[in-house]
Image: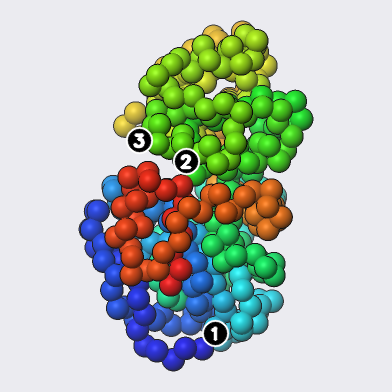
Amino acid sequence: MNTQETMKAIVLHDLASWSVDDVPVPPVPDGGMLIRVQACGLCGSDLRTIRSGHENVTLPWILGHEICGNVVALGTGFTGPWKIGRRLSIGPNVYDPTDPYVADGRHELSANVREIAQQWPGALSEYVAIPEESIVMGNILPVPAGMPDEHAAVVEPASSVIHAHERAGTTIGDTVLIMGSGPVGCLHVAVARARGADKVFMSDIVASRLELAEAFSPDAVIDATRESVAKRVAGLTNGIGPTVVVTANPSPQAPVDAVQMVARGGRVVLFGGLPHDNSKPGIDVNTVHYRNINLIGLSRFAPRHFRMSLQMLASGRIPGEKLVTRVLPLNQANEGIRSALEGRELKVVFKP
C-alpha cells in the first residue's frame, strides 16, 4: 500500500463551510480494510448535511458514502473474501445481525442501521477505512471489469430506487409519474422503464432540472410553475391518471397532490422525506379509502437491492453516463459542491 502518512480530504468544518485538507491516513481497522478511493459520489444527503447538519455527524467530519475503490491493506483478523488490489463498490449501510428483521432477511426494515460517513468517516478523501462490521454485515461487491469507477460509486442511490419499484410492483403496462427531476428522480425513470413501465412522466418546479432530466427521455416533462400537473397528466392518461406516482422531492404538498392524481387502485410511493417540522400533510384519507389507493412508505435498501443496482449500472439499464454529469478531482471541491447545491448537475463524482 501507499506508505504516506497524510492524505487529501474534503472536510466539512461547519454548516456550508468546507476545505480540502491534509489529514492522517486512517489506520487499517482490525478485521477491516483500507481502501484507496477511486471515486466517491456526492449524495443528496451529503448536501443536506452540508446545509443543515445531521444528528449523527459531529463536525469537523469527512462525508461521502457512494464509494468505489481498491483494497490496499487488510486488517488483523480479516475474514472477508477480498484480496489486495480488488476493486470494490461499497455501500454505506451496516446492519445489526441481532435485529429480528435482518435475521428474517428484511434488512430494509431494520431500525438499527449504521452508516459509513456517519458512524465512521466517509470517502471524500484519498483513502477510507472500512470497518469489520461492514465486512460482515454491509454491502460490498466486486466491480465488473470494464465498469467505470464513477458508475461503480453510485450503486447506493439506485438501490433505494430499486426497492421503491419492487414495493410498488411497477411492471409492464404501468404509467408512472415521478414528482421530482433530480438525480433520484432520473433513477426512478430508468428503473421504472427497466421494469416494463409503458409511460413515464416527470414533473418539477425547476425548469433547469427538467432540462437535465431530459437525458433520461421521460415521455413528458411537466413544469409545475407553468401548468397544472394534474390536468396535464389527466390529459396524457385519458382521464384515468398514472397507476404509480412517486414523490421524489421534499415538498409536503407532493403526497397530497399525488393522492389526487393517481389512478383508482393505484400506488403512491412516498419516497422523498419531508421536513421534520412539516411532515404531516393534509392527505384526503377518504380519497385513499374510496379510490382504493395504496400508500407505500419506504426508506433504505437491502443487500439484494444493492446487487441489482450494480448489475443494472454495469449492463447499462441504468445509464451511469447520463446520471454522472460531472467528474472532478478533490482539489475542485468548491466547484463540485457548489454546482450540486445549486442544481447545475445531476450527480457530481469526485475522483481523488
Q: Does residue 194 sit above or below 91 in this rendering?
A: above
Looking at the picture, the colour scheme in use is: rainbow
Q: How far apart are marks 2 and 3 (CA)?
A: 29 Å
| Residue situated in front as seen by the camera: 123 or 349 | 349
| Residue situated in front as seen by the camera: 211 or 71 | 211
- Which mark identifies residue 73? 1
Q: Distance between the residues labelled 1 and 3?
A: 41 Å
Closer to us: mark 2 or mark 1? Answer: 2
Horizontal side of residue 15 vs 166, given as left or right: left
Q: Mark 2 Cα within 10 Å, few/some/many (few <14, many 20+)?
A: many
Residue 85 image point, x, y percent: 61, 82
**What residue does disc 2 label?**
212
Q: Which amino acid does label 2 sit on?
A: Leu
Closer to us: mark 1 or mark 3? Answer: 1
Quadrant of the image occupied by residue 348 = bottom left
Q: Which amino acid does label 3 sit on?
A: His
**What residue does disc 3 label?**
276
Q: Can residue 29 be seen in this view?
A: yes
Q: Mark 3 Cα within 10 Å, few/some/many (few <14, many 20+)?
A: few
Horizontal side of residue 147 vs 22, given as left or right: right
Which residue appears at 42% of the width and 22% of the height? 224
Q: Does residue 73 sit above or below 9 in this rendering?
A: below
Residue 274 image point, x, y percent: 40, 33
Extreme residue in the bottom direction = 3
SS state under label 1: strand
| Residue situated in front as seen by the camera: 17 or 190 | 190
Labels 1 and 3 touching (C-beta < 8 A): no
Q: What residue type is labelled 1?
A: Ala
Q: Does residue 151 sit above or below 292 in this rendering?
A: below
Quadrant of the image occupied by residue 315 = bottom right
Closer to us: mark 2 or mark 3? Answer: 2
